[in-house]
Amino acid sequence: MKNIFFTLFFISLSNSLLSQSSKKIIYLNTDNIEITKKQYKTAHKKTTFYVETENDTVIIKKLYSRKNFVKLDSIYLNQIKGFLTKVTGAEFDKNKNTLIHLYSANKNIHKDVKYKKYWNYIKKHSNKYQSFLIGTKESGIEQNIKSHLYLDEDDLLNYLFFENSIFEINHLFIKPNGETFIFFGVDDILMVLDWSV
């Protein structure tokens, strides 16, 4: 009886492994163009991330850029500026370049509040830049204006820019003219600053 069970288990396991290995693997770049496995594996990990999806016949491994560019039209730009004025009050200046770090969990935020190199740069260039650490509705972050900590109780930023993000921290760099860079999953806010200026 044990031998029959072992044989059936082994056959089942073999079929499962064979069916998984018979799936076609497709590699895509950020523009949805098929690339080679080598190109996929040599993609720069700091500037890209990948998402793997799978069905019965195909495994798709797609690269995504951590930094993306959009030009906000005047309606969206005014909506964002109005939102930031509402959330931050007098702190927000619509004529400055704005860095927003959006947290869906509070694990990095305390480190970022005390990030001296980052905040010294923002202070030194306060005529051109402003920065806000904003928690999503479910982040558990408490507002503290002195520490640049705010709460997006309506989840507007998440809805407009990061609804499908798989990361706990995402970022925006918004210029007064509506040019906007969207960053996915960069844990170091100084790196986001470097990529923005």
Image (cartoon, rainbow, N blue to C red):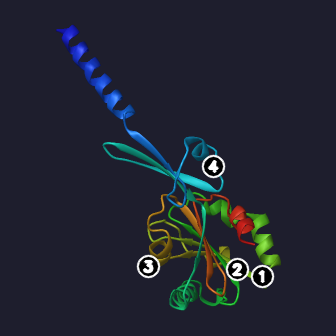
Q: Which residue is mark 3?
A: 154
Whole-percent x, y for residue 139 in the image: 48, 65
Inter-mark Cα distance, 4 to 1: 35 Å
Name the N-terminal-most of marks 3 and 4: 4
**How many labels were placed on the picture?**
4
* Image spot of residue 162 (x, y percent): 49, 68
Q: Earlier in the sequence, mark 4 or mark 2?
A: 4
Tell me the kind of residue under disc 3. Asp
The quarter of the image holding the C terminus is bottom right
CB under 8 Å between discs 1 and 2: yes
Q: Nearer the viewer, residue 68 or 130?
A: 68
Q: Which residue is mark 2?
A: 130
Q: Which residue is mark 4?
A: 43
Q: CA distance from mark 3 to mark 2?
A: 22 Å
Q: Secondary structure at mark 2?
A: strand
Residue under numbered circle 1: 126
Residue 105 percent coordinates (x, y): 51, 61
Marks 4 and 2, how far apart in space?
32 Å
